[in-house]
Image: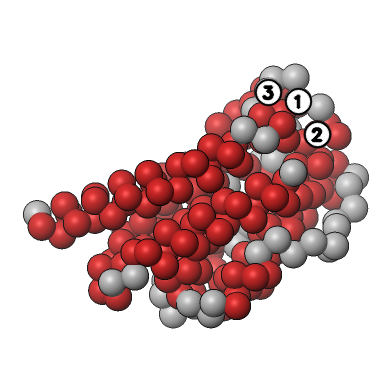
Amino acid sequence: MKDALLTETFLQRLRNTTAQSHEALESLPLSKNIIDPAVTKSEYAAYLSLMYSVIRDTETVIFPLLENTVPDLQSRRKAAALEADLAFLGTALQHAHSPLKNAVQSGDVAFALGVMYVVEGSSLGGRVIYKNIESSMGFNESGGAAYFAGYGGSTGSKWKSFIEVLTRYADEHGCEDEIIAGANFAFDAIKDHLS
């Protein structure tokens, strides 16, 4: 019971301390457009192109730091889904930006877990976006919306298993502040990138 209470307290603190950064990201025009039923193909393609840089960075900068910490890390790769969606839309891949490159300077697993918290959390929000893209544009997991389809029906369980890894690591290493710093860094870096 004590462990559950500690976990809940840390997760609540993580949510509360990152709420302002999270809200700032969600209030961007591009973030709002993507959940609007009137979203256009060009807005959608622009969003996916920008997210591709974020996901590519996650897989090249963050994943190496977490190889020995997140057991199912390789099943959390999403760059290929974005590549498929962009190809379906006829949009060229952009490699110009690296929004998370500064995350590696810390070389800190806890900081990387904080970044991963944001990226994995976006899979939950992605399910809401998926419904909008499917109903308003007709794209689905097979064509144009593979990225937002995420883990499909396993999205909730994948999130729960990640949170278990995150909270266990925080408890074992006493690194809550570093995880929170990583999450705030990711929200801010993605917001700046999408601006």
Residue at the disc numbered 1: 39
173 left or right of 118 in image: left
Measured from the top left, where is residue 131 in percent x and y? 60, 29
Determine which residue is flagged by label 3. 36
Q: Is residue 82 left or right of residue 168?
A: right
Tell me what residue is drawn at x 24 percent, y 50 percent.
Answer: 8
The residue that disc 2 covers is 43
Which residue is most to the left?
1
Query: Is mark 3 in CB contact (under 8 Å) with mark 1?
Result: yes
Which element type, helix, strand or loop, lies under badge 1?
A: loop
User: Which amino acid type is shown beneath numbered disc 2?
Assistant: Glu
Query: Who comes first in sequence, dot 3 or dot 2?
Result: 3
Helix, strand or loop at label 2? It is helix
In percent of width and height, residue 182 lies at 50, 63
Residue at image location 50% in from the left, 69% down from the top: 112
- Number of residues whose C-alpha sits closer than 10 Å to that of mark 1, classed few (under 14), some (14–19) or many (20 or more): some
Q: Is residue 167 visible?
A: yes
CA gap, disc 1 to disc 2? 6 Å
Amino acid found under the numbered disc labelled 1: Val
Residues 138 and 69: in front is 69
Which residue corresponds to the image point at 73% horizontal and 35% vertical from the top-left?
30
Task: Say if mark 1 contacts mark 2, CB within 8 Å.
Answer: yes
